[in-house]
Amino acid sequence: MNLKTFTLTLASTRPIHGSASELRGFFATRFNEYTLLHQHSADKLIYRYPMVQYKMIDSKPMVIGVNDGAEVLKQVYDKYDEIKLGEEVYEIVEKGISVKNQDFGLSDRYHSYEFATPWLALNQENYMKYYGLKSEERNEFLKKTLVANLLSMSKSLDYRVPGNIKCEVSVKIRKNRLKDVNMMVFIGRFHTNFLIPDYLGIGKSVSRGFGAIRQLTLKENNTLKCSL
């Protein structure tokens, strides 16, 4: 299927220090009337794949809108001249805009990706299951989790997957914090027969910047060996 994406990048007069959660907080507060910007309706969380996602990529703020989220970003992207992240206020001197129609879904060939931001793959229940597995079983568990992430994402985007998703993962565990809670996340790469536009997130808390992916070129991928 085809996804419409609107990608916004921001630059200031000085380096921007802040988190994706703080970037989300700025847009949610400034444009509270747009529910897609904050995933809440009548103070209740909307449990679906976020159509607007916030990232900090190499310390640079990025906001991505998908389909209806792209239309919302079109309406608000130029209605501010500064952003507040935490206690810091940054003058915005440049807004980069990219509007694309991008392929998404099952592919007849394999594609390699890296996590540009950590992948929050496990909830508390799955975290305990993961740690109870033997080392050789953990990789299989993560492969199934990745497939489940892609299926859930597809369902929210109204895409019916017409076949089996296959994947291999090559990741390492890292610690991170979300809402002042220590979390286990993963960094690394994966290989799958599924097309995903760059910087869309997979897994949990993607609206807050987790799980953003980037497709690798053949040259970049020469260290990842997979057998499918």
Image: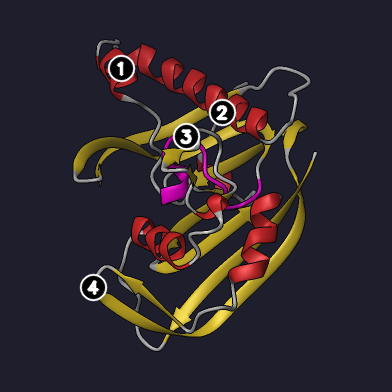
Task: Identify the residue shown where x is 50% and y is 80%.
Answer: 80
Dominant SS type (magenta): loop
Graded by Cα atoms within 10 Å as few (under 14), some (14 to 19) or many (20 or more), the crowding at tag 1 reads: few
Mark 3 and mark 1 lie on one chain; the one further toward the N terminus is 1
Q: Earlier in the sequence, mark 4 or mark 2?
A: 4
Q: How far apart are marks 4 and 2 (CA)?
A: 45 Å
Mark found first going from the N terminus, 2 or 3: 3
The amino acid beneath tag 1 is Glu
The residue where tag 4 is placed is 87
Question: Mark 3–mark 1 contact, CB under 8 Å?
Answer: no
Q: What element carries label 2?
A: loop
Asked whether, in this view, residue 193 is left or right of residue 176, the answer is right
Mark 2 to mark 1 CA distance (whole Å):
29 Å
| N-terminal label among 2 and 1 | 1
Instruction: Please state which amino acid type lies under the numbered disc 2.
Output: Cys
Residue pointed to by mark 2: 226
x, y percent for residue 111? 66, 38
Q: Earlier in the sequence, mark 1 or mark 4?
A: 4
Image quarter (top left, top right, bottom left or bottom right) of the C terminus = top right
- The numbered mark at residue 203 is 3
Marks 1/4: CA distance? 35 Å
Give SS at disc 3.
Answer: loop
Between the C-alphas of marks 2 and 3, the distance is 22 Å
Indicate left or right for 116 with 104 as reference.
left
Tell whether 132 sits left or right of 37: left
Give the residue at x 54% y 84%. Answer: 94
**Residue 207 highlighted magenta (yes or no):** yes
Residue numbers of the magenta segment: 197-209
